[in-house]
Image (cartoon, rainbow, N blue to C red):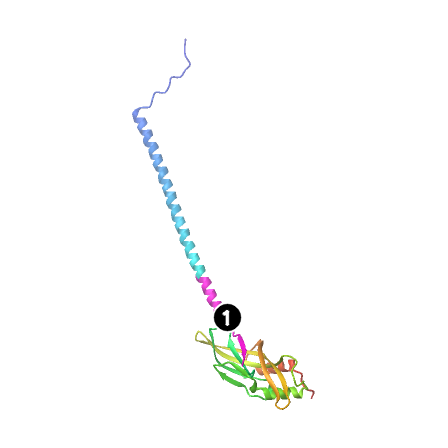
Amino acid sequence: MSSDSTPPDPPPTKQAQERAEKAEAAAIRRRWITLGEVLAVAAVVISGLTLWNNWSERADSRAEKAADAKQSSAKAQILVFSTKTSVDGRTLILTPTSEDQLVQSQTVRFPSSFGADPAETTGQSRVEVRWFEVPLKKARENAGMPDDSRGDERVPVAISTRFMVDGVIHDDVAIYDVGYTVRGRLLGGHNVTLRGLSLVSRTKESGLQARLDARWKAIFPQPDK
């Protein structure tokens, strides 16, 4: 009687087994080499990203510092005064709000109708009532205004200031309203006391007097001609 069963494969020879083991070992080594290459590339990428991040942060920091410095420099070029009145109220002391600003000189101009010459100062910024008191009293009298003010009155002045910031000279031209009060005296006439300073507008030297006169006409009652 015949059999349909297939005889089993003969066991591998020792040489074939060794070749199979060597092939498997080589495949394992290739896998480890590939993994090592991947890890090496990943390390390079991570290192590059770290360097880029550090450089970017330093660049951002430098840009931020440069922007802050530029903003501070631009801000230091804008002249803003704080004011203090002398004990007798006859002088208004002007001090830049920025400690970086050092005033070199100033020219204070008055409305043309006052007939008062510009006042020049050096170093100490101020407005003194004696510079314009007489024409102001006359203007009030001609306008029929009361002897005593009913609050803070205003008279416009133009102030051209030359100041220094970090060794660089800058110029500022502006029109201000000087606040004042008037009190009458039976024997001594009227006394003008300064109260403060208010910025109206920054402007240019060209046409400055005309703008100052227009401001005076706008805020002060003009006598009928």
Q: Quadrant of the C terminus?
A: bottom right
Q: Quadrant of residue 137?
A: bottom right
The residue sitting at 63% across, 84% down in the picture is: 183
Q: Quadrant of residue 30?
A: top left
**Residue 109 position by quadrant:** bottom right
Q: In which quarter of the image is the N terminus?
A: top left
Kindly give the residue lying farthest to the top in the view shown: 1
Q: Is residue 67 magenta?
A: yes
Q: What element carries label 1?
A: helix
Magenta stretch? Answer: 62-86
The residue furthest front is 186
Classify 10 Å Cα crowding around label 1: few (below 14), some (14-19), many (20 and above).
Answer: few
| Residue 172 colored in magenta in the image | no
Nearer-the-camera pick, 198 or 60:
198
User: Where in the figure is residue 173, as x and y percent of width and height?
Assistant: 54, 78
Q: In the rendered picture of this protein, how many numbered marks are placed on residues?
A: 1
Q: Residue furthest bottom?
A: 187
Q: Can residue 61 be seen in this view?
A: yes
Percent of width and height locating residue 46: 40, 49
**In the foreground, 87 or 150:** 87
The secondary structure that most of the magenta stretch takes on is helix
For mark 1, what is the residue? 75
